[in-house]
């Protein structure tokens, strides 16, 4: 398994896991748990692809990820109790930060492929990174967490997306720009989490 | 009028009716009643077509159904009181079960037409069958009923969709596979309703 | 600056302003304020374009409007207090009515361009005019205001859209039909506001 495939799966699992937790908290049944996990994992990329009119969607091209979440949803209830003992909050935050970095920058790259102007491309990256959680919270009838907790989650993605765009303008090789920006976002997110940074309202 | 057209209209009316009831319960005005009924009737198929990038949408190709709901919304308030006396809950559940079967399997067939892999096709069928109600509940600011009532509504559709897919794999004629799977879903739904089956959380 | 560009900017600003107010009322942070303002300003046209499968989206083709809202969101908090003193409710209602007229009729024209049948085109116009507010309220976890306040907001748009369609049928020149219908909607909206007209439930 290549590194990128491993990170991808980790990021999807973390997204789905956030959906499991939220759906259980709302006392949803099996159908709800699966759907909310699916939306949390793939919602951001799906919205971006619809806005860009790109097909096939990520989870259509990679059917195996959809099946993975389906299987996990079926075993989620007993697993959840075990997982909460094994998986520390720290591990979840780290995996989530890695996912945020990777997916945001990948979203910007997709948008550039589709000839989007720079500012729009930077926004598409943020949408990819955060709208899974936004749609999860809407389906669960909550005001989206990322819009109200005052933590610089989307802002980390936005800043790192611009780092990627600026490196592109100055002719930095694409792969280096992509990996270093993703790393920058993940690192910035972890730093702001560690020091509990709040953005003013 | 052909049989399929009759079933189609019945299923759309039942979807719209669920929207009328929910919108009235939320004390919505005329605009809300129409919009929620429209979303409940066509939301599932519309979401599927957007995900598959298919156009024209069902209610664009069949403008007459959109007009029908528009007219019904205008007369809904007085009609509702009368309808509640005439239409028993049993009749609504039956019409809804018939609609679930027909639309779910039709959704799978659409997805196969669009070259979707099997698991994705089975999901597209479920989306077609249930997301009208999901979007209706989101607009009405509720956690979607189908995600929390523990009744095997989506699961009946999912099982029947696979029956349809498996029959396709074994070379069963398309029309027979379609009708028998739709009938299977409707029957399974009615059985689980009659015996008040609950799926474990 | 042409007149239409000026009206467009005013209408977008009014939409965004409604998003700022709603997001602040829900105690959202900077990311929430920007996103909700963006959705309120562009949500209706974006939904219409997705339903019609038209690209590029309005805010992709006019990146400058997206940047404008981004900058405004950053200075919204201090501005809001000042703006509330300068900007009377009357001015907001007028700008909003002008926007409703212009965007609704423009939505109908887009739909006709895309070969939509007449009733669907009239609905697409209403969607363009009102769904920014609907999506704003859904993200803010409210039942959409336009579905429950009993004021003929969407209805004004609907009637004016048909005026535009009927003028088209009778060979009235396109530009005259467009401007007079937009003016009709704006005027009707302001009249119903002034006399506090309520539509029966």
Image: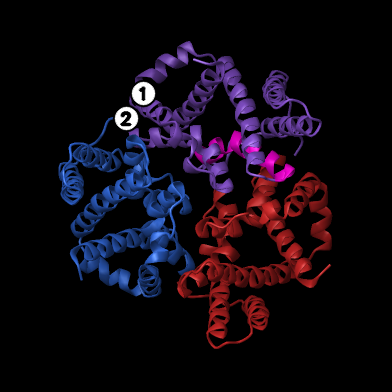
Chain colours: A blue, B red, C purple
Q: Which chain is mark 1 on?
A: C
Nearer to the camera, A176 or A8: A176
Quarter of the figure with the C terminus of chain C:
top right
Which image quadrant for residue C97?
A: top right
Q: Which residue is mark 1?
A: C77
* Image location of residue B28, percent across then percent down: 67, 42
Task: Give the image quarter of residue B6.
Answer: bottom right
Q: Which residues are magenta?
A: C117-136
- Residue drawn at 54 percent across, 37 percent down: C45
The image position of residue B144, as x and y in percent, is: 54, 57
Q: Is residue C128 magenta?
A: yes
Q: Is A113 on the left or on the right of B42, as rendered?
A: left
Q: Which residue is mark 2?
A: A201
Q: Secondary structure at mark 1?
A: helix
As drawn, B2 above or below A90: below
Q: Does residue A88 show up magenta in the picture? A: no
User: Considering depth in this image, is C120 or B69 the residue closer to the camera?
Assistant: C120
Disc assigned to residue C178: none
Task: Kindly give the residue lying farthest to the top in the view shown.
Answer: C86
Inspect this view and state whether residue B20 appears.
yes
Query: How far from the left and from the top, in percent, is residue A29?
Result: 47, 67
> In this picture, is C65 found above or below B106?
above
Residue B117: x and y in percent read 46, 72
């Amino acid at each position: 398994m290549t590194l990128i495939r491993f990170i991808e799966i980790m990021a999807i699992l973390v997204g789905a896991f956030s959906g499991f937790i939220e759906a259980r908290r709302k006392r949803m049944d099996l159908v709800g748990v699966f759907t909310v996990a699916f939306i949390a994992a793939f919602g951001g990329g799906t919205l971006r692809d619809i806005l860009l009119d790109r097909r096939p969607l990520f989870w259509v091209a990679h059917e195996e990820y959809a099946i993975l979440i389906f299987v996990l949803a079926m075993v989620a209830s007993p697993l959840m109790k075990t997982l909460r003992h094994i998986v520390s909050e720290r591990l979840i935050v780290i995996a989530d930060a890695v996912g945020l970095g990777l997916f945001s920058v990948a979203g910007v790259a997709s948008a550039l492929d589709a000839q989007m102007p720079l500012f729009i491309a930077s926004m598409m990256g943020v949408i990819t990174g955060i709208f899974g959680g936004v749609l999860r919270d809407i389906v669960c009838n909550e005001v989206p967490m990322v819009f109200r907790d005052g933590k610089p989650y989307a802002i980390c993605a936005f800043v790192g997306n611009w780092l990627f765009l600026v490196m592109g303008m100055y002719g930095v090789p694409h792969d280096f720009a992509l990996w270093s920006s993703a790393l920058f976002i993940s690192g910035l997110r972890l730093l702001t989490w560690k020091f509990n940074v709040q953005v003013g309202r």
